[in-house]
Amino acid sequence: MSHFTEEHNLFREGFREFLKKEVSPHIEKWEKTGTIERFIWEKFGEMGYFGLDYPEEYGGLALDKYYTVIWLEEMQRIHSCGFAAAMWAHAFLAMQHLNAEGDERIKKEYLAPSIEGKKIGCLCITEPFAGSDVAGMRTTAVLEGDEYVINGSKTFITNGVYSDYLVVSAKTDPDAGARGISMFLIDRSTAGVSASKLDKLGWRASDTAEISFDGVRIPKENLLGVENKGFPYLMQHLALERLIMGINAHARAEYALEYTLQYMSERTAFGKSIDRFQALRHMVAEMATRVEINKVFNYHVADKLNKGEYPVKEATMSKLNSTKMADEVIYDCLQLLGGYGYMEEYPLARLLRDSRLGPIGGGTSQILKEVLAKIVIDKKTYKSSF
């Protein structure tokens, strides 16, 4: 059974053409500067590409999850996982919290312009001393009259330099561990917010930052949802984030394999194209099998989300297995290009660097294995917060 209708396929064709025309000509510049120019955000907004998953009353399209799957897959084919990350971190990390936990004012002032591409958001969870240990965060938010005062720092934040607003997790009850975390919206213009750009191995088009909050004062109305409920909110959205990274992984591996097959059909050695050599053909057969298995499983998880289920186990498996597969497939694809695979003018070198973040970002593979061990061995269950 295909998950994609004729409408889905037309959307894919249109989005692929849009990326080819509007994005691809600028990729090399953005990779060099680490700055994605504002005009492309607004073009995404004009076309409705930031509103696929959001309510119509705020300018969204309220479409099913398969449009999101297509959006993610096509973004992995444009030779810049950094550009893709900047877009999906805005659309599916920052904006998810505004939509799920923001009040009407926040939705009108921040979510609606985000859908239009006129405001850019980032999600700030990870800290220098508390990576995957979210409950160990040190950033604090203290209520003083009608304002929260926020102090602390975050790191590895995608869109952390150029975004217009920040969705920030902070401790409102430092003694309560995970039960003392709250979520806040902070406008970039607020006094005391500063960011420094980080230099990375890959994802070079995206701006990744360390952010400091020094006596930042925000109105108490900028609390997202209920105080001390931040951890359940984060957990609620993690299933989608993990699936996003799983889909990204199978899509970039598929793109790498397609490119490699084209190269092999044109490259000759000993009087024939190298796709005629059995040893190499068998490598391709194995890679194609792994890509297809992961893709089909990821569609299965997307189907669960589309039905309103909360597939923590399956989404965690998606990210764990797909990101490992992508790293290994892209590594072997580079090998099949020989010396050309090592050259920057060919896509595999950048793709290998960009892919390496997969098993790290959004929860390391080691953390995900422990999450799965708790589910499978200890019979731990996760329930939706909404």
Image (tube, rainbow, N blue to C red):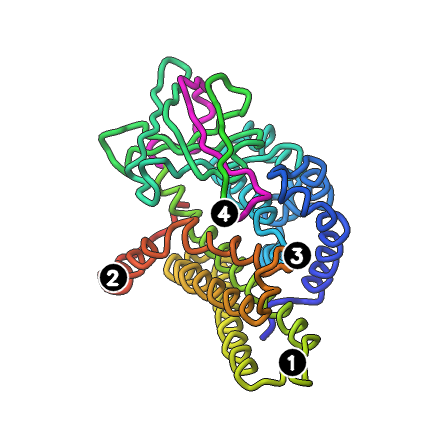
Q: Residue at 67%, 81% (x, y): give it.
A: 273
**Residue 14 appears at what percent x and percent y?**
74, 57
- Residue 41: mark in rendering: none
Q: Residue at 63%, 45% (x, y): give it.
A: 51
**Residue 144 appears at what percent x and percent y?**
36, 14
Gap in Å between the C-alphas at discs 4 and 2? 38 Å
Precedes in sequence: disc 2 or disc 1: 1
Q: Residues within 10 Å of mark 4 (few under 14, many from 20)?
A: few
Q: Amino acid at mark 1?
A: Ala
- Assign a secondary structure to mark 1: strand
Q: Is residue 223 left or right of residue 14?
A: left
Precedes in sequence: disc 4 or disc 2: 4
Which residue position holds label 2? Answer: 379
Precedes in sequence: disc 2 or disc 3: 3
- Assign a secondary structure to mark 4: loop
Q: Amino acid at mark 4?
A: Leu
Which residue position holds label 4? Answer: 201
Which residue position holds label 1? Answer: 269
Gap in Å between the C-alphas at discs 2 and 3? 49 Å
Which residue position holds label 3? Answer: 345
Region in magenta: 202-229
**Residue 383 visible (yes or no):** yes
Gap in Å between the C-alphas at discs 1 and 3? 21 Å
Q: Amino acid at mark 3?
A: Glu
The quarter of the displayed image where residue 316 is located: bottom left
Precedes in sequence: disc 1 or disc 3: 1
- Contact between marks 4 and 3 (CB within 8 A): the answer is no
Q: Residue at 60%, 39% (x, y): give it.
A: 34
